[in-house]
Image (tube, rainbow, N blue to C red):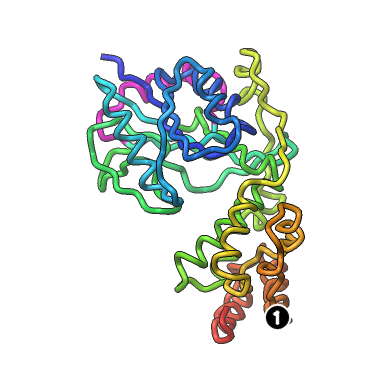
């Protein structure tokens, strides 16, 4: 029996790219499950215009990747028969003509319990170049009922059982559009850093900086051209694969303002979020800005400037040694 292809996608305020994603996913998926967590934009309305989509309500009030993954997985497992699950975010699409690639037959015939790994093609803002991390990402799973716990942040999206067989796909890739809107991406990274400070207070501020500025360590030598065949098949279906729909103030910035109001600006003085004038932004939104004025000391500013300057060579001995010493002054 041919397995059912099910796409699992969590959503919150993804109207900027959701229609493109759903049109691309519909080219290969039998079912598309969208778990919306209180979007304030047109995400739900957009999703409901696509016939293969089932919209699920994610009632969670906090950020919890594991919880939303379990919600999607439970819904997928109500669909009878053998299933292949692909867990993609709204800014991720399979390369064009995936079902025509010889690897697709291999994917369809993989035994239950197989983890499906793909290369992650990070598109740059110019849409003409990209970079591909060395690590292959487990975006898919040939479902065998294995339970999935997941973690609150940066969780594996699907079960990856110890010792499970793994299928690495090279011809079919996952296109990642996060970096095509650089301002939106930076807003999201600011929020991630704040989440870490609140929820992982034991982590060193310098380590948090390094993790959430990894894109600044990608040098020109890692850039690769975007191959036309990755997009062309979708464009032939009338799907716009290259424009970027930019919006006003990213919703992540509003979430940072909430954290500043709740925890106070001083809690984030060693977090690299102060390229934004939060007081001015809060006042513009009618929230008052006294609680979110820049609290950084001269030392904080100097360390952040050093981290920024050394991000591209942070693994070398001298920066590593200096970073180790910075722990003695709170970094």
Could you say where residue 41 lies in the image, as x and y percent from the top left?
60, 35
Residue drawn at x 66%, y 63% is: 273
Residue 299 shown in magenta: no
**Considering depth in this image, is 210 or 258 the residue closer to the camera?**
258
Could you say where residue 135 lies in the image, as x and y percent from the top left?
48, 48
Q: Is residue 297 left or right of 169 when viewed as pictured?
A: right
Question: Within the image, what quadrant is residue 115 found in?
Answer: top left
Question: Within the image, what quadrant is residue 112 found in?
Answer: top left
Q: Is residue 244 visible?
A: yes
Residue drawn at x 42%, y 23% is: 54
Task: Say what secondary structure mark 1 lies in.
Answer: loop
Residue situated furthest bottom in the rendering: 328
Residue drawn at x 40%, y 41% is: 59
Could you say where residue 119 lies in the image, as x and y percent from the top left?
50, 38
Q: Is residue 8 left or right of 210 when viewed as pictured?
A: left
Q: Which residues are magenta?
A: 93-114
Q: For mark 1, does the 10 Å Cα neighbourhood hold few (<14), some (14 to 19), or many (20 or more) residues?
A: few
Residue 103 shown in magenta: yes
User: Which quadrant: the C terminus?
Assistant: bottom right
């Amino acid at each position: 029996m041919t397995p059912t292809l099910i796409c699992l996608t969590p959503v919150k305020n993804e109207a900027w790219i959701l229609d493109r994603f759903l049109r691309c996913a519909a080219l290969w998926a039998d079912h598309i499950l969208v778990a919306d967590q209180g979007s304030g934009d047109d995400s739900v309305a957009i999703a409901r215009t696509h016939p293969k989509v089932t919209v699920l309500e994610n009632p969670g009030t906090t950020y919890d990747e594991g919880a939303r993954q379990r919600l999607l997985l439970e819904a997928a497992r109500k669909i009878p028969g053998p299933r292949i699950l692909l867990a993609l975010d709204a800014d991720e699409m399979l390369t064009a003509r995936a079902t025509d690639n010889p690897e697709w037959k291999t994917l369809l015939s993989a035994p239950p319990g197989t983890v499906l790994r793909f290369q992650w093609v990070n598109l740059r803002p110019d849409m003409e170049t990209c970079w591909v991390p060395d690590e292959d990402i487990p975006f898919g799973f040939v479902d065998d009922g294995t339970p999935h716990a997941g973690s609150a942040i940066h969780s594996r999206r699907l079960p990856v059982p110890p010792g499970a067989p793994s299928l690495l796909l090279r011809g079919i890739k996952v296109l990642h559009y996060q970096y095509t809107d650089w301002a939106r991406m930076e807003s999201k990274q600011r929020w991630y850093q704040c989440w870490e400070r609140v929820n992982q207070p034991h982590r060193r501020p310098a380590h948090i900086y390094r993790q959430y500025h990894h894109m600044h360590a990608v040098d020109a030598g890692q850039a690769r051209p975007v191959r036309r065949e990755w997009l062309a098949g979708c464009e032939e279906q009338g799907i716009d694969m290259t424009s970027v729909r930019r919006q006003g103030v990213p919703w992540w910035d509003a979430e940072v303002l909430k954290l500043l109001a709740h925890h106070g600006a001083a809690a984030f003085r060693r977090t690299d979020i102060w390229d934004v004038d939060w007081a001015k932004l809060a006042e513009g939104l009618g929230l008052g800005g006294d609680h979110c004025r820049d609290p950084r000391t001269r030392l904080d500013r100097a360390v952040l400037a050093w981290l920024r300057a050394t991000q591209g060579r942070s693994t070398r001995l001298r920066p590593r040694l200096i970073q180790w010493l910075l722990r003695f002054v709170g970094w």
